[in-house]
Image (spheres, rainbow, N blue to C red):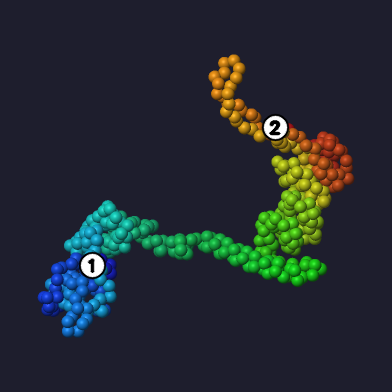
Amino acid sequence: LLTSAGFGVFSPVWSLPQEPASKSALPTEVPDTIIVTQAGELAGELLSASYVDPETGKTMLAFRSIAGGEILLEGSRVARPKTKPDLLTQDYENRLASMDDTPEAHTAMVDWLKKTAGAKARFPDQIEFHLRRICQLDPNDEDARRALGYRKENGRWFDDAAWNAAHGYTKDRTWKSELELQIQQFEQSQKDEAGNAKTAWNRFLARLPQIPPSSHEAELKAVITPALAIHLIELAKKEPSAAARRIMIEAIATQRGQEITNALLYFAIADADENLRDLAIGLLELPGFDRTGAAAKASESLSHSDNTIVNRSGAVLGELGDTVAVLPLIRAIKTTHMVQTGNQPGRMNVGQGSGPGSSGAGLNIQNGPAAVPKEFVNSDVLSALRQITGQNHGENEEAWMNWYIQVFTLAGTDVRREK
């Protein structure tokens, strides 16, 4: 008989030796049961769920093996009785016991397991066993190999592990390329650095009340790292306290790099506190910052939809004083933005109609505020132009453009705003 336990082993079911049992101890038969004892696993019928030996006082179980022998087992030796297998399991084991060990028989068994309701989910290991046995008996069976995940390449079959290894993939829960592993390791290192940075910052804040104000800068430089500075950028953007943001901005400014520059520009333009905007502008003027690059980046905000941001950007550019911003500033002397009219918010009322031809009930719709375009003259932009160039052409964009062409461009080059 074939057994599904220990796939690949075909052996007869172990039968018990014939041993007499007291007939008085054998009540009505109960369903087939597997008895697990200290000696192993027995297959057969449990004839008595409980029997007390009158001589020893021990609880005994009467059992008949599938070979027909009947024995009494000490209850203490029974580790766990198993209930009778369900019908699906019995059906499979009956088919398994009678099937031939041929590719065709195993193929038919796989088909039955896949098509029988509930069998595919219940017996995935058995399906794999039969598929592998097919491959052992018929190495050229392509359907079985593909069902097992094999791939054919250059006339050779590779299982999943061999194929991925041959193509440079490494198993890390899933198969990953060398590049994916490097990215994963980098991301993990960044995460670790961020965690360490957060811990270091919290320790610094805990010590801050004991640090004299005159030593704040030195203490910051001692604790700050590039990773901590990057971590503080996002913290500072979300921090509601201006005093806490000040400490963070000063800490960020101890480092250098494009990301640090961009962060200080953000605070110089977008922070709600004017004093902190001035602080960030001043920090950008420290040695080590690329003022030309900062001016070029800040110039991008001159096209912002919010007129307040446009003017704040102009103020930052005036302080940076780099001529790279002159042309963008000229183009931002006047900008158009959408503004809301003063009407009340729109609402819709249901009421009684009146007037000729009215049917009675009707809808009374009141228009809400409308967004209309409005041109602004940006005073901070004009101030920045005067500060950088030493010129004063007022609001006359054309005059500013003519001056710019004469000073900054080759003859004949037109840098006027496209209409």
SS assignment at label 2: loop
* Circle number at residue 43: none
SS assignment at label 1: loop
Instruction: Work out whether 316 lies above or below 20.
Output: above
Task: Tell me where residue 6 appears, x and y as whole percent.
Answer: 28, 69
User: Could you tell me if the residues under marks 2 and 1 are in contact, i.e. CB atoms within 8 Å?
Assistant: no
Classify the position of the N terminus by image quarter.
bottom left
Identify the residue position indicated by label 2 in the image: 343
Identify the residue position indicated by label 1 in the image: 3
Circle 2 or circle 1, nearest the eye = 2
Q: CA distance from mark 2 to mark 1?
A: 85 Å
Task: Tell me where residue 32 appears, x and y as whole percent.
Answer: 19, 67
Q: Is residue 240 visible?
A: yes
Mark 2 nearby-residue class (10 Å; few <14, some 14–19, many ≥20): few
Classify the position of the C terminus by image quarter.
top right
Q: Nearer the viewer, residue 276 or 323?
A: 276
Q: Amino acid at mark 2?
A: Asn
Instruction: Return the disc, 2 or 1, that comes first in the chain's sequence.
Output: 1
